[in-house]
Amino acid sequence: MPTLSAVYAQDNTDSVDESESDDGEVKETSAQIIDELNRAYTYSTYYTTHKDDPRPDAEVIINGVDFIAQGDENEGYIDTIEGVEAYVWPGEVGYVEYPFTIEEEGIYNIEITYYALASVSNDIELSFFIDGESPYSTADRIVLSKCWVDEEDSYTIDENGVKTFNVDENDNQIRPSLTEYLTWQTSPLKDTDGLFNDPLIFNFTEGEHVLRIESQKARLAIAQIRIYNEEPTPAAADAENVTTDESVASQTTGIYIPLEGEMADYKSDVTLYATYDRSTYLTSPSDPVLMRYNTIGLENWKSSGQTVTWKFTMPEDGWVKIGIRGKQNQMRGLYSNRRLYIDGEVPCEEAEAVKFYYSESWQCVTPTDADGNTIYFWLEAGEHEIALEAVPGEIGDIMRRLDDLVFYLNSYYRQILQITSPTPDEYNTYMIDKQIPSIIPDFQIYADELRAVKDDIETLAGTAGTEAVSLETMAQLLDKCIERPDNIPSMLGQLKDDITSLSQWMTDYRSQYLEVDLIEIVSADNEFSSVKENFLKSLAFSFKSFLGSFFQDYNVLSSDEDGALNVWVSLGRDQAQIVKELVDSYFVPETGIKTSINLVQGGILEATLAGKGPDVALFIGGDLPIQLAARDCIVDLSEFEDYEEITERFAPNIMTLYTYQEGNEKGVYGLPISQTFSMMFYRSDVLQSFGFTDVPEDWDQLIEMLPTLQRSYMGIGLSFDVFGTFMVQRGLNYYNEMKTATIFDDPLAVDAFETWTKFYTTYSFEQTFDAFSRFRTGEYPIIITGYTFYNQLYMAAPEIRGLWDFEVMPGYRNADGTVNHSTTSASSGGIIFSKLNQEQREDAWELLKWFTSAEIQSEYGRSIEALLGPLGRFDTANMEALTQLSWSRSEVDKILEQMEATVEIDIIPATYIVTRNITNAFRETVNLNKNPRDTFLWFNRDTNDEILRKYEEMGIEIPASTGN
């Protein structure tokens, strides 16, 4: 049985009971103790404790080859890479240990020189332990970035060295794909949560120590680890090769070096691809009609640590100023920060956080000193690099304070909930301030802190606006709670809403959005390009754009060549564009099969029946493949010779979703592309506060947890579509062998239905709920839902990282003691239409095989994640490709375990009535308190009648025997 993965395991205690010590002082609840222990493990707490400790002027160098131990599947070795001797860590998991000696006690930074080996992951994730212990939670999830560049075949360079992106048949530019650039990098260990500008600190005592590095996503070479102290960056007035004196800078003339944002040479993140802005003619380059990728950043350049680098050549020694044409139109009232590097160094303190204030239009930002004087930099003739790194700036300290506030407010919300229930009795005072004695003084502290933070935000913004209204709203609510503690129960709903609103505000404003169009490096005698629009030019640009919208079809991604496969893709434009780029870059050159990709949303069945459908359709889900198969519209893929070999790519039972049966004849009418299924997510900190040390392995164990949770008005979230799971865990499907009737009159099927409805009738589960909000607050410490819920939690709930995990579904315990963790899944796939002749069918089959292969599925998945970030992580059906996406080893192992346990429900032409009547039976049982067995069987008779009627309507012969 999996154990809870939070840091502190606790004994079984009643989470809301309080007792008095001998001196009458009220003790903290176990929930408060757990919360404080978990909060003490954060880097913010560690930093506050140690920030004023001595910083010795000392340095310790650890060579990568001087390791003393390694293990857990890590079979590293010593090798020389690009002339550097290093320890090579070829696998993803394991550990390596290094000894070192500290001569003087104090706090230090750690820097690592590494070489990212070619791999399928987007970055490297490591955990650092000192003498066997992790100093804080952030050290458990250190991220080292890789280096990414545009694919060489995605652009051309003319004789003048000008780089231009490739265009498609319609003269629209194609977004360049990114590929890894293997090189040595040196980086300090940094905060991954976007709260600190400076490298992480580690407190070391004098003497010998052991540094242990563990990983779930390694594949790197380590040349050196340096333990040191970061030198403070001097102000412009004191820095070398920096001046604000115009008379000095004016000695250099005639230099103008433009750097297009989208043409950046190196990116630290795979999401930092070229973007586009079509709002104005000022964007360089621009076109009112055609697609031109002309910027970088937008919403993808918002996370702390993301860095973009441009190379340039200085024609002569001289002084230059730097102008950055950027746009930050996301954080109204505040600004985004970028740390400026020149040749890998921050030249002066003012370059540590260059500010980009909110603006709907382009602005030119140049580094200045405190008096507003332009800063000039001395550069020698030759090759140089300029880089911009997203950093939190002053907002980081504000977010740290708010992180603590939200954490403790959520803790108090749960404690109040455990006393009052979600629907407090208006005639009961509950005496919250007596049951939780610390709540009123703490609420006063929180209200004061919220207003102090609000004042700090307004100081940073330079105006008293409405951007921090969530903070004032929260503070006013706390004031009401302090003034009238008896009214706290009646304000419980508002408390939850205001905490949610504050959390969302933090998520929005901790991001460092920026879009960059152009960087100009110029001498003092040159001006930066104007960012003021000319009215007539703007009018002409808008008019041309308007006219072009009548002639440019953005749904046609390829030209319709004679004889080309007509492929319809049911996705968004950007995703469909990636499909097209993959087809153009790999499939067509490799096979010579002409292919036309078109973006179409819905209407495939109607178009096909009208004779205007596609040759191939991708990402077709639900029952549509079976509906088309029943009408002889698509091809039986099992007729191809290598069909069996191809299906080995997928989960063992998934082809059931694409199998159609008439009588004794079966055919398979699609190949799966995506697959999603439910898993169990849990809050380890909340469960431990109730004394649970293990997550439930079967449904009985989950039910046994309910009294403890529900006694404190906590709950468990269950997705609505789990009836199929209860069926397959009992070894059942929905239909008889001939698919002419259901088997819902089987006693085990009735038991499955009764088990399902009992969660709602007996255990009072909610039918609909906000899974993200309930899990974030801890109201629902267990939620069973689709595994892509992980993506949302990881991106949108940073304050609970490290406090949650996921596992396979609870299972059905068989008589022999084994547990069946089976579940059903949903899938979308690719289909071939039967209007094609045999040669065309073979070409279409080649396309489906190619697109569902591990190589292309992983490439598509990485491209989608680069486009949308972790929220867009692709739920591929190819099991090998899944291992090549950005999941850690432990995560992908759990997903694959559940994936291999999926058992699918057959789809028939009358599936609509089956799902409808299951829902109807559920609602009558739960909402109208009907007998579950009688209700289920009554609706089943109607279901079976409709199944037969549907077969007759479609002219499908019904076998003589239609018994169950």
Image: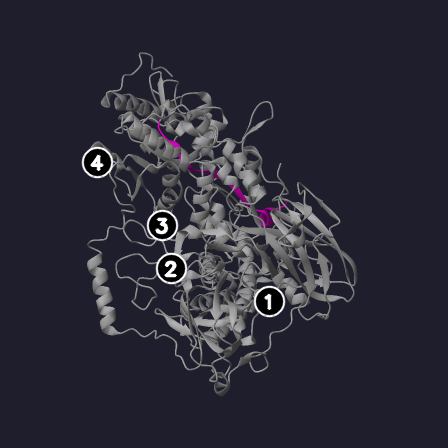
Q: Which mark is residue 612?
A: 4
Where is 682 relative to 328, above or below?
A: above
Looking at the image, which is closer to me, 145 or 933? 145
- At label 1, counting other C-alpha atoms closer than 10 Å, the crowd grade (few under 14, some 14-19, many 20 or more) is some
Relative to 339, 613 lies left or right: left
Mark 3, mark 1: which one is toward the viewer?
3
User: Circle 4 — which element?
Assistant: loop
Q: Residue 332 appears in which quarter of the rendering?
A: bottom left
Q: Badge 4: few (under 14), some or many (20 or more) residues near its Cα, within 10 Å?
A: few
Q: Which structural element holds mark 1?
A: loop
Which residue is label 1 attached to?
198
Q: How far apart are marks 2 and 4 (CA)?
A: 43 Å
Nearer to us of marks 2 and 4 is 2
Q: Which residue is drawn at 51% across and 67% down?
A: 383
In percent of width and height, residue 9 lies at 66, 47
Residue nearest the observer in this picture, 140 or 520: 520
Q: Mark 2 points at which residue?
A: 158
Which numbered disc flags the more N-terminal residue, 4 or 3?
A: 3
* Stretch in magenta: 669-691
Q: Where is residue 95 shown, x and y percent of the image?
A: 68, 47
Three-letter amino acid code at disc 1? Answer: Asp
CA gap between label 4 and label 3 equals 25 Å
Q: How far apart are marks 4 and 1 (CA)?
A: 60 Å
Looking at marks 1 and 2 on the same chain, the residue that comes earlier in the sequence is marked by 2
Under tag 2, what secondary structure? loop
What separation in Å lies between label 3 and label 1 (alpha carbons)?
A: 36 Å
- For residue 574, the mark is 3
Is residue 797 magenta-colored? no
Type of residue at label 3?
Asp
